[in-house]
Image (spheres, grey):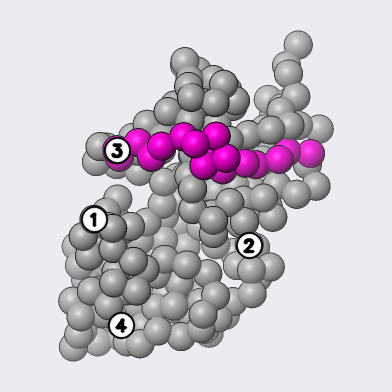
Amino acid sequence: MTQKINKIVLASGNAGKVREINKLFAGCGIEVVPQSDFNVPEVPETGTTFVENAIIKARHAARLTGLPAISDDSGIEVDALDARPGVYSARYAGEGASDLDNNNKMLEELQGIPEAERTARYWCLLVFMRHHNDPVPIITQASWEGRILEAPLGDGGFGYDPIFYVPTHNCASGELSMEEKNKISHRALALQAMLEEFKKHNFID
């Protein structure tokens, strides 16, 4: 008989991600807790793809907490930058870079690039592991199309949200409410796909 899941450790200390994921999982009886609640240290992300990094992080969190773990590896790729920064999105401007540092570096690199060539997309890849030796992790992924603005707008979200223009809503991601973002973002779509997988596996009702 499949065991229901009611608590998952998120292999991240990113408060923004914890908030977004808990909001999306609200109502299905799952509590998502950050690995920082268990003093789990960050693990080096040595993979060259989102899926490799997500598996490394989920396995690490599951092993140290004994709980099922979910990990998100996400980033942004910009066509004019040959799909950079990709898996290096969080440390685009160097190790320990702030969101502002990363945004400024991107705006600098895209200076003079016309609007039509500033196309970009966010990617989110999610991995769920029932335990650290899980041989069949559940993997879902989704993307969110947009383009890079010439200057930041809004103070919502995190990461590249202030400079990521969302054509469907004619504003920056940083100007969206969390409710709106949670319907359309790359992470929202990947999490919705993950919830569907949970239902298929009878992890939730």
Dot 4 amino acid type = Ala
Kindly check if marks 1 and 2 are in contact, taking CB atoms under 8 A apart as contact: no
Kindly check if marks 4 and 1 are in contact, taking CB atoms under 8 A apart as contact: no
Figure check: 82 above or below 101: above
Label 1 to label 2: alpha-carbon separation: 28 Å
**Residue stretch in magenta:** 29-45
Task: Identify the secondary structure beneath mark 4.
Answer: helix
Residue, far top: 1
Label 2 to label 4: alpha-carbon separation: 27 Å
Residue 193 in the image: state x and y as whole percent: 60, 44
Q: Which residue is mark 1?
A: 95
Based on the picture, tell me whether residue 14 belongs to the magenta stretch: no
Kindly check if marks 3 and 2 are in contact, taking CB atoms under 8 A apart as contact: no
Label 3 to label 4: alpha-carbon separation: 36 Å
Dot 2 amino acid type = Asn
- Residue 136 appears anywhere in the view: no
Residue at the image position 60 percent from the left and 67 percent from the top? 181
- Going from N to C along the chain, the mark reached first, 1 or 2, is 1
Along the horizontal axis of the image, is 113 left or right of 184? left
Dot 3 amino acid type = Pro
Numbered label tally:
4
Which quadrant holds the C terminus?
top right
> Any mark on residue 182, and which?
2
Along the horizontal axis of the image, is 13 left or right of 177? left
